[in-house]
Amino acid sequence: MHNPLRSEADAFRWVVVIGVGAIAVIVLTLLTRPVFGVVLAATLLGFGAGVAYRSSRGSLPHSVVLTKGRDGRHRLLVVANETVGGGALLEEIRNRCRGRDSEILLVTPALTASRAAHWASDVDEAIELARQRMELSLIEIGRLGLKARGEIGDSDPNVAIEDALRVFPADEIVISTHPPQRSRWLERGVVERAREEIDLPITHVVVDLSAEGVAED
C-alpha cells in the first residue's frame, strides 16, 4: 500500500500544499471573522507542525500496529533476505510460535546492488532471488508444523516493514541479519530505526550462514 510520505521530498511537498491552503483559509477568515480566524490559525499551524514532525520521523504506521487481531491468533512478522533460510532464524520462529495458534508473514525485501540499479529498474534478478529464498524458507517453516505465507517487500527493509504492517496486524516482529561485520542492514541502522518507530516487540536474530555451512549468494 503506497505511503505518500516515504521521502523528505514528498513530505516537503505535502507540507507546502497544506501550508498554502491553510494560509488562504486563515486570510479569508481573518477578513470576515477576526476572532474565529485567530483560533483557526492556531489550530492549523499546530496541525501542520505535527505533520512535519511525523514526516521527518519517517511516518511509520503507529496507528496500524494498534489494530490487533481479535481472534486470539498470534501474528508474527518475519523480515529477512539473504538469511531467510538460516537455522537460527527458523529456530527463533519455532520458539516464538510454540504452543500458540500462530499466523506468520514472511517478508523478503528485494535487494538491489546499488541505488543506480534501483532507479534503472534493474531489479528483476533481485526479485527472483528473493522469491527463491522466500519459497525455500516457507517450505522449511512448513516442516516445523507452522503455517506461513510470504511476500516480496520493498528494497528498503524499513519501508517493507511499514507496508506489511498496513495489512498484517502483527503482535511482534523478527528481523534477521548477517553478523555485524557483514550486515548492510545493521550498517544502515534498520533494526534501530524499527525499534524507535514501531510500538511492537522486535527481536533481532543474527544468522551466520558460514558457521551453519550454508553458501551465501
Image (tube, helix red, strand yellow):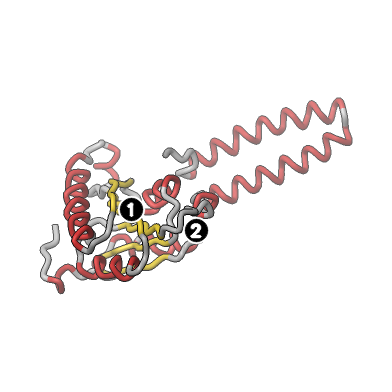
Q: Is residue 30 above or below residue 143?
A: above
Task: Indicate which disc residue 45 carries.
Answer: none
Q: Position of residue 124 (x, y in %)?
A: 20, 39
State the residue position of label 1: 105
Q: Is residue 88 above or below residue 135?
A: below
In this view, the residue in front, 25 or 146, is 146
* First reached walking from the N terminus: tag 2 or tag 1: 1
In this view, the residue in front, 113 or 123, is 123
Which residue is at 35% across, 50% downward? 156
Location of the N terminus by quadrant is top left
Which residue is at 55% across, 50% downward? 63
Q: Callout 2: few (<14), some (14-19), or many (20+) C-alpha neighbours within 10 Å?
A: some
State the residue position of label 2: 197
Amino acid type at circle 1 is Leu
Q: Is 116 positioned to the left or the right of 56 in the image? A: left
Location of the C terminus by quadrant is bottom left
In this view, the residue in front, 9 or 164, is 164
Amino acid type at circle 2 is Glu
